[in-house]
Image (cartoon, grey):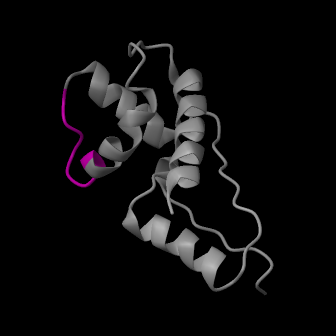
């Protein structure tokens, strides 16, 4: 108990609750390491790409997830075969976001 503190969100999207949970683990539990882990065929990143490719909003609450993931690959043209690249870009974006968050 207490050896691992896990915060999971689809696409490891950093909303206020996820950031607060990570901050809690660092501040109060003294967690020494934060790891950001993506995975192949990430459905959240795929849904984001599909929404962007189709120039459509995602259904309901999924749009908030799309809004959190989209900036990870804003600087790249969205193509149908970019899922693997987008997953890696999302990991790098999440790490940068965490490093820059006080």
The image shows residue 11, relative to residue 56, as above or below, that is below
Locate residue 98, reporting x and y percent.
Answer: 55, 54
Q: Position of residue 31 (x, y in %)?
A: 73, 74
Q: Is 96 in front, or is 61?
A: 96
Q: Quadrant of the N terminus?
A: bottom right
Q: How many marks?
A: 0
Toward which corner of the image does residue 73 lie, by quadrant? top left
Magenta-highlighted residues = 56-63
Residue displayed at 41% across by 70% down? 17
For this view, does 5 lie left or right of residue 78? right
> Is 61 a magenta residue?
yes
Quadrant of res 78? top left
Q: Residue at x 37, y 35 (%)?
A: 70
Residue nearer the viewer, 80 or 2 = 2
State whether residue 24 is above or below residue 59.
below
Q: In the rendering, at what x and y percent does residue 28 appear? A: 63, 86
Residue 96 as seen in the image, left or right of residue 53: right
In the rendered view, tell whether residue 20 sits above or below residue 76.
below
Foreground residue, 95 or 55?
Answer: 95
| Residue that appears at 65% across and 69% down | 6
List x then y, in percent, for residue 54: 24, 21
Say if the magenta span includes residue 23: no
For the stretch drawn in magenta, the main secondary structure is loop
Q: Residue sitting at 20 percent across and 51 percent down?
A: 60
């Amino acid at each position: 108990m207490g050896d691992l503190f896990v915060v999971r969100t689809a696409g490891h999207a950093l909303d206020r609750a996820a950031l607060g949970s990570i901050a809690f683990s660092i501040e109060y539990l003294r967690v020494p390491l934060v790891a950001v882990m993506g995975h192949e065929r990430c459905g959240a990143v795929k849904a984001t790409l599909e929404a962007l490719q189709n120039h459509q909003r995602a259904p309901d609450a999924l749009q908030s997830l799309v809004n959190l993931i989209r900036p990870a690959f804003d600087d790249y043209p969205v193509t149908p075969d970019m899922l693997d690249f987008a997953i890696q870009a999302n990991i790098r974006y999440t790490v940068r976001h965490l490093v820059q968050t006080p």
